[in-house]
């Protein structure tokens, strides 16, 4: 009897662990062609049951690809593995470069970091600069949708509708959170505000006085942020050896008529357009941004 129960537990445990890995499974960095390449780089096929490194896949032969503009060696990119003088400290803060994952320790196989969420069909760095984790930060700036001083309730769910500042990315035309890469040594809180100012308020075209004023206006809002996500992003640029991670913060305006009802949005830098977007399950956003937005809707008991 005892043995049978034990076996049942093992089975339940296995089911659970399968489910956990399914929840974290990446989709946008598998199948089809690698994004934004003129070289038509096709990803080696990785079916759902071959994503995890523990799934045997003897024929697996990922396409080797690192984009020309990364090989050209811009300041934000690492050299090739084995290049003279390149002695990266994996899973550590390496000088100013954060090579730690938010999700724990990643494996390094033959001197090359390995994607913690499994196979992608491409090895090398693709269009990403760093081997291993590439860190971003995403500011989710929200307010309530209002009409004549009242929160607008959704027709079906009767829950209040939340809006967030949404940008259209210049690189692929997809709508997204106005996030960006964390510069080496930069604090995430600084990246969050800088990216919002650049992409949603076009601070790059402001005089230093105007920028100072905008920063001052946003100070309270940005001091009151709450973390909603930290970890791996299912980004279409991910490869077996380089991947995106982010920290997403929600900055919410609760006051009807407060700053976020007066501010005028203007797209800049990597954004070609910006708008207040109603939040709902119908959203189709870049990478896993929809998941982060859902977390924010849940947090505020808003319509989804
Ligand atoms: C974007 C972030 C995004 C990250 C991962 C960065 O390029 O600016 O908004 O979360 O990539 O997809």
Image (cartoon, rainbow, N blue to C red):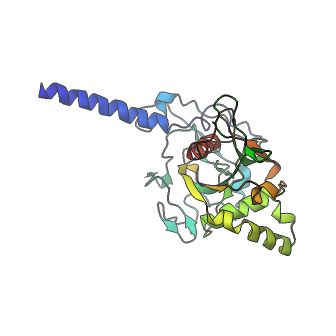
Report the label total.
0
> Of 276 and 155, which appears nearest the observer?
155
- Residue lying farthest front? 149
Q: Position of residue 164 (x, y in %)?
A: 71, 48
Vertical side of 144 occupied by 90: above or below: below
Residue 91 can be seen in this image: yes
In the image, what residue occupies the spot 76% across and 62% down? 197
> Of 262 and 110, which appears nearest the observer?
262
Give the left or right position of residue 195, taking residue 91 as reference.
Answer: right
Quarter the N terminus occupies: top left
Q: Quadrant of residue 130?
A: bottom right
Give the left or right position of residue 206, taking residue 255 as reference.
Answer: right
Q: Quadrant of residue 304?
A: top right
> Of 131 and 151, which appears nearest the observer?
151
Give the left or right position of residue 135, taking residue 11 as reference.
Answer: right
Q: Position of residue 109 (x, y in %)?
A: 45, 50
Residue 234 can be seen in this image: no
In the image, what residue occupies the spot 54% across and 60% down? 82
Q: Quadrant of residue 226?
A: bottom right
In the image, what residue occupies the spot 47% across and 64% down? 92
Give the left or right position of residue 261, taking residue 30 as reference.
Answer: right
Q: Position of residue 215 (x, y in %)?
A: 75, 69
Vertical side of 96 occupied by 268: above or below: above
- Residue lying farthest bottom? 209
Q: Position of residue 162 (x, y in %)?
A: 68, 44
In the image, what residue occupies the spot 55% across and 64% down? 98
């Amino acid at each position: 009897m005892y043995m049978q129960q034990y076996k049942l537990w093992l089975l339940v445990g296995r089911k659970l662990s399968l489910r956990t890995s399914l929840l974290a499974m990446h989709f946008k960095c598998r199948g089809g062609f690698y994004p934004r390449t003129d070289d038509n780089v096709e990803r080696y096929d990785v079916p759902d049951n071959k994503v995890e490194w523990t799934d045997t896949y003897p024929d697996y032969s990922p396409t080797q690809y690192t984009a020309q503009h990364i090989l050209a060696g811009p300041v934000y990119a690492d050299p090739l593995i084995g290049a003279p003088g390149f002695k990266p400290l994996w899973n550590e803060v390496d000088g100013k470069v954060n090579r730690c994952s938010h999700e724990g320790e990643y494996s390094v196989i033959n001197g090359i970091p390995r994607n913690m969420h499994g196979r992608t069909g491409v090895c090398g760095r693709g269009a990403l600069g760093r081997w291993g984790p590439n860190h971003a930060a995403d500011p989710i700036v929200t307010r309530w949708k209002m009409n004549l001083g009242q929160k607008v309730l959704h027709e079906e769910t009767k829950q209040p509708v939340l809006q967030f500042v949404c940008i259209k990315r210049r690189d692929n035309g997809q709508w997204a959170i106005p996030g960006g890469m964390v510069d080496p040594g930069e604090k995430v809180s600084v990246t969050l505000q800088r990216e919002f100012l650049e992409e949603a308020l076009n601070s790059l075209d402001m005089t230093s006085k105007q920028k100072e004023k905008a920063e001052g206006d946003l100070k309270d809002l940005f001091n009151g942020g709450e973390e909603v996500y930290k970890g791996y992003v299912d980004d279409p640029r991910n490869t077996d050896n380089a991947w995106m991670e982010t920290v997403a913060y929600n900055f919410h305006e609760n006051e009807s008529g407060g700053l976020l009802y007066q501010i005028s949005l203007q797209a800049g830098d990597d954004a070609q357009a910006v708008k207040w977007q109603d939040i709902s399950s119908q959203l189709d956003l870049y990478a896993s941004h929809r998941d982060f937005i859902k977390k924010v809707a849940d947090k505020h008991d808003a319509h989804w």
